[in-house]
Image (cartoon, rainbow, N blue to C red):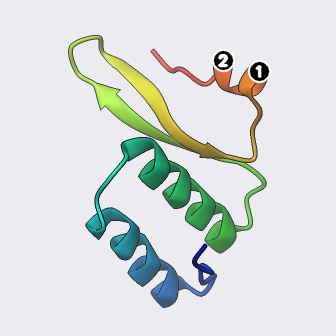
Amino acid sequence: MTTLRSEPVGAFIDSAAILARGGNLDAQSNALATQVSAVSGASATVIYLLDGDARLLLPVGWQGLDADEMEDAELG
């Protein structure tokens, strides 16, 4: 696994690399959530995508939360 940087410039470079490599959306979203937590010092992070048809924000990636906590993470 790649070591992520916590300084702002390095964090932006790491985040861009995560998105550029493509692949599985869940894996990318979880990697971005981990990066956000590393930079911000947050104990938990959730990445949401907008479902325009359903008018909901859906959690697609997270770090620092368990399955029970994620059940409450859907915003609508």
Q: Position of residue 62 (x, y in %)?
A: 60, 43
Identify which residue, 37 or 27, lies in the foreground.
Answer: 27
Q: Residue at x 36, y 75 (%)?
A: 17
Q: Residue at x 30, y 67 (%)?
A: 21
Q: Is residue 19 left or right of residue 32?
A: left
Question: Mark 2 — residue?
Answer: 71
Q: Secondary structure at mark 1?
A: helix
Q: Is residue 16 left or right of residue 42?
A: left
Q: Position of residue 49 (x, y in %)?
A: 36, 35
Relative to 45, say whether 59 is above or below. Answer: above
How crowded pointer 2 is (Cα within 10 Å; few <14, some 14-19, many 20+) is rated as few
Q: Position of residue 55 (x, y in %)?
A: 30, 15
Relative to 30, say whether 66 is above or below. Answer: above
Identify which residue, 26 or 74, lies in the foreground.
Answer: 26
Relative to 75, say whether 42 is above or below. Answer: below
Q: Quadrant of residue 52?
A: top left
Disc number placed over residue 25 in the picture, else none: none
Question: Mark 1 — residue?
Answer: 68
Are the residues at dot 1 and dot 2 in contact (C-beta closer than 8 Å)? yes
Q: How many marks?
A: 2
